[in-house]
Image (cartoon, rainbow, N blue to C red):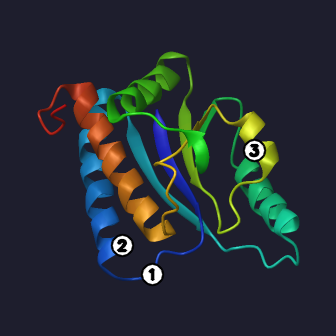
Amino acid sequence: MHVSVYAVGRMKAGPERELAGRFLDRFAKAGPAVGLDFTGVTEIPESRAASVDERRREEGQRLLARRDGATALVLLDERGKDIGSEEFALSISRFGENGRKNLILAIGGPDGHDPSLHGDADLVLSFGKLTWPHQLVRVMLAEQLYRSATILSGHPYHRA
Protein backbone atom coordinates (compact mmCIF):
# COMPACT_ATOMS: atom_id res chain seq x y z
CA MET A 1 0.00 0.00 0.00
CA HIS A 2 1.28 3.46 -0.87
CA VAL A 3 1.45 5.73 2.18
CA SER A 4 1.61 9.51 1.96
CA VAL A 5 1.39 12.41 4.35
CA TYR A 6 -0.70 15.42 3.38
CA ALA A 7 -0.07 18.59 5.37
CA VAL A 8 -1.54 22.05 5.27
CA GLY A 9 1.33 24.46 5.75
CA ARG A 10 5.03 24.30 5.11
CA MET A 11 7.63 22.80 7.42
CA LYS A 12 10.43 25.30 7.85
CA ALA A 13 14.09 24.27 8.03
CA GLY A 14 15.23 23.33 11.50
CA PRO A 15 15.61 20.46 13.93
CA GLU A 16 11.95 19.39 13.68
CA ARG A 17 12.20 19.06 9.90
CA GLU A 18 15.43 17.08 10.24
CA LEU A 19 13.93 14.75 12.84
CA ALA A 20 10.74 14.18 10.84
CA GLY A 21 12.88 13.50 7.77
CA ARG A 22 15.00 10.99 9.67
CA PHE A 23 11.93 9.00 10.80
CA LEU A 24 10.32 9.18 7.36
CA ASP A 25 13.54 7.89 5.82
CA ARG A 26 13.54 5.00 8.31
CA PHE A 27 9.90 4.31 7.46
CA ALA A 28 10.67 4.38 3.73
CA LYS A 29 13.35 1.73 4.31
CA ALA A 30 11.41 -0.47 6.77
CA GLY A 31 7.94 -0.20 5.21
CA PRO A 32 8.37 -2.30 2.06
CA ALA A 33 9.05 -5.43 4.13
CA VAL A 34 5.46 -5.18 5.44
CA GLY A 35 3.87 -3.89 2.22
CA LEU A 36 4.05 -0.16 2.98
CA ASP A 37 5.59 2.09 0.34
CA PHE A 38 6.20 5.66 1.50
CA THR A 39 5.45 8.06 -1.36
CA GLY A 40 6.27 11.33 0.40
CA VAL A 41 4.82 14.43 1.98
CA THR A 42 2.56 16.80 0.08
CA GLU A 43 2.47 20.31 1.50
CA ILE A 44 -0.24 22.71 0.46
CA PRO A 45 -0.38 26.37 1.43
CA GLU A 46 -2.84 27.51 4.05
CA SER A 47 -5.99 28.98 2.56
CA ARG A 48 -6.22 32.77 2.58
CA ALA A 49 -10.04 32.80 2.66
CA ALA A 50 -11.69 35.33 4.96
CA SER A 51 -13.54 32.95 7.32
CA VAL A 52 -12.57 29.82 9.21
CA ASP A 53 -15.27 27.80 7.46
CA GLU A 54 -14.10 28.91 4.02
CA ARG A 55 -10.47 28.14 4.85
CA ARG A 56 -11.30 24.65 6.09
CA ARG A 57 -13.54 24.01 3.09
CA GLU A 58 -10.84 25.06 0.59
CA GLU A 59 -8.16 22.99 2.30
CA GLY A 60 -10.52 20.00 2.53
CA GLN A 61 -11.38 20.21 -1.17
CA ARG A 62 -7.68 20.08 -2.05
CA LEU A 63 -7.34 16.93 0.03
CA LEU A 64 -10.41 15.25 -1.45
CA ALA A 65 -9.08 15.93 -4.94
CA ARG A 66 -6.24 13.52 -4.11
CA ARG A 67 -8.48 10.73 -2.87
CA ASP A 68 -10.20 7.97 -4.77
CA GLY A 69 -12.13 4.86 -3.73
CA ALA A 70 -8.94 2.84 -3.23
CA THR A 71 -7.50 5.38 -0.79
CA ALA A 72 -7.94 5.17 2.96
CA LEU A 73 -7.99 8.53 4.75
CA VAL A 74 -6.71 9.13 8.28
CA LEU A 75 -7.23 12.61 9.72
CA LEU A 76 -5.13 13.88 12.58
CA ASP A 77 -7.43 15.91 14.81
CA GLU A 78 -7.38 16.71 18.52
CA ARG A 79 -10.99 15.50 18.72
CA GLY A 80 -10.12 12.14 17.19
CA LYS A 81 -9.69 8.70 18.66
CA ASP A 82 -6.80 8.27 21.08
CA ILE A 83 -5.20 4.88 20.33
CA GLY A 84 -1.91 3.18 21.07
CA SER A 85 0.91 2.44 18.66
CA GLU A 86 0.00 -1.22 18.22
CA GLU A 87 -3.62 -0.40 17.35
CA PHE A 88 -2.40 2.28 14.93
CA ALA A 89 -0.11 -0.25 13.22
CA LEU A 90 -2.94 -2.79 12.99
CA SER A 91 -5.28 -0.14 11.54
CA ILE A 92 -2.77 0.61 8.81
CA SER A 93 -2.34 -3.08 8.11
CA ARG A 94 -6.10 -3.64 7.91
CA PHE A 95 -6.49 -0.90 5.30
CA GLY A 96 -4.19 -2.89 3.02
CA GLU A 97 -5.86 -6.20 3.87
CA ASN A 98 -9.21 -4.66 2.93
CA GLY A 99 -7.98 -3.81 -0.54
CA ARG A 100 -6.92 -0.22 -0.07
CA LYS A 101 -4.06 0.61 -2.42
CA ASN A 102 -3.27 4.01 -0.89
CA LEU A 103 -3.29 5.65 2.51
CA ILE A 104 -3.29 9.40 3.12
CA LEU A 105 -2.55 10.67 6.61
CA ALA A 106 -3.73 14.29 6.76
CA ILE A 107 -2.58 17.07 9.05
CA GLY A 108 -4.98 20.01 8.83
CA GLY A 109 -4.26 23.70 8.93
CA PRO A 110 -4.39 25.94 12.00
CA ASP A 111 -8.20 25.89 11.85
CA GLY A 112 -8.36 22.09 11.67
CA HIS A 113 -10.12 19.91 9.13
CA ASP A 114 -13.39 20.70 7.40
CA PRO A 115 -16.20 18.90 9.28
CA SER A 116 -17.28 17.19 6.04
CA LEU A 117 -13.95 15.32 5.97
CA HIS A 118 -14.68 13.67 9.29
CA GLY A 119 -17.54 11.70 7.73
CA ASP A 120 -15.33 10.64 4.80
CA ALA A 121 -12.37 9.59 6.94
CA ASP A 122 -11.63 5.96 7.69
CA LEU A 123 -10.04 6.99 10.98
CA VAL A 124 -9.87 10.28 12.88
CA LEU A 125 -6.84 10.07 15.11
CA SER A 126 -5.67 12.19 18.03
CA PHE A 127 -2.23 12.48 19.57
CA GLY A 128 -3.95 13.35 22.83
CA LYS A 129 -6.11 16.20 24.01
CA LEU A 130 -3.22 18.64 24.05
CA THR A 131 -2.79 21.02 21.13
CA TRP A 132 0.52 20.42 19.32
CA PRO A 133 2.42 22.67 16.92
CA HIS A 134 2.26 21.31 13.37
CA GLN A 135 6.02 20.77 13.29
CA LEU A 136 5.81 18.42 16.28
CA VAL A 137 2.76 16.64 14.88
CA ARG A 138 4.80 15.84 11.78
CA VAL A 139 7.64 14.48 13.89
CA MET A 140 5.26 12.37 15.97
CA LEU A 141 3.44 11.06 12.90
CA ALA A 142 6.74 10.22 11.17
CA GLU A 143 7.94 8.33 14.25
CA GLN A 144 4.63 6.45 14.56
CA LEU A 145 4.78 5.41 10.90
CA TYR A 146 8.26 4.02 11.44
CA ARG A 147 7.13 2.39 14.69
CA SER A 148 4.17 0.83 12.85
CA ALA A 149 6.48 -0.76 10.29
CA THR A 150 8.63 -2.17 13.09
CA ILE A 151 5.59 -3.49 14.98
CA LEU A 152 4.22 -5.17 11.86
CA SER A 153 7.60 -6.75 11.08
CA GLY A 154 8.26 -7.90 14.65
CA HIS A 155 11.34 -5.69 14.97
CA PRO A 156 12.35 -4.96 18.60
CA TYR A 157 12.20 -1.12 18.20
CA HIS A 158 8.75 -1.17 19.81
CA ARG A 159 8.88 -2.55 23.31
CA ALA A 160 5.50 -2.37 24.99
Q: Which label number is shown at residue 104?
A: none
Above or below, 109 relative to 91:
below
Q: Nearer the viewer, residue 81 or 6?
A: 81
| Callout 3 secondary element | helix
Question: Residues at badges 1 and 2 in contact (C-beta under 8 Å)?
Answer: yes
Instruction: Identify the mark nearer the N-term, 1 or 2.
Output: 1
Is residue 14 rendered to the left or right of residue 99? left
The structure residue drawn at horizontal position 43% and vertical position 61%, both measured from the top left corner, is 138
Above or below, 149 relative to 127:
above
Q: Nearer the viewer, residue 125 or 42?
A: 125
Q: Which label number is shown at residue 12?
A: 1
| Callout 1 secondary element | loop
The structure residue drawn at horizontal position 76% and vertical position 35%, both measured from the top left corner, is 119
Q: Which residue is situated farthest in the front direction here?
A: 129
- Residue bearing mark 2: 17
Q: Which residue is situated farthest in the top direction here?
A: 98
Q: Distance between the residues labelled 1 and 2?
A: 7 Å
- Residue bearing mark 3: 117
**In this figure, what is the number of numbered marks?**
3
Res. 140 image quadrant: bottom left
Q: How far apart are marks 3 and 1 (CA)?
A: 26 Å
Above or below, 35 relative to 39:
above
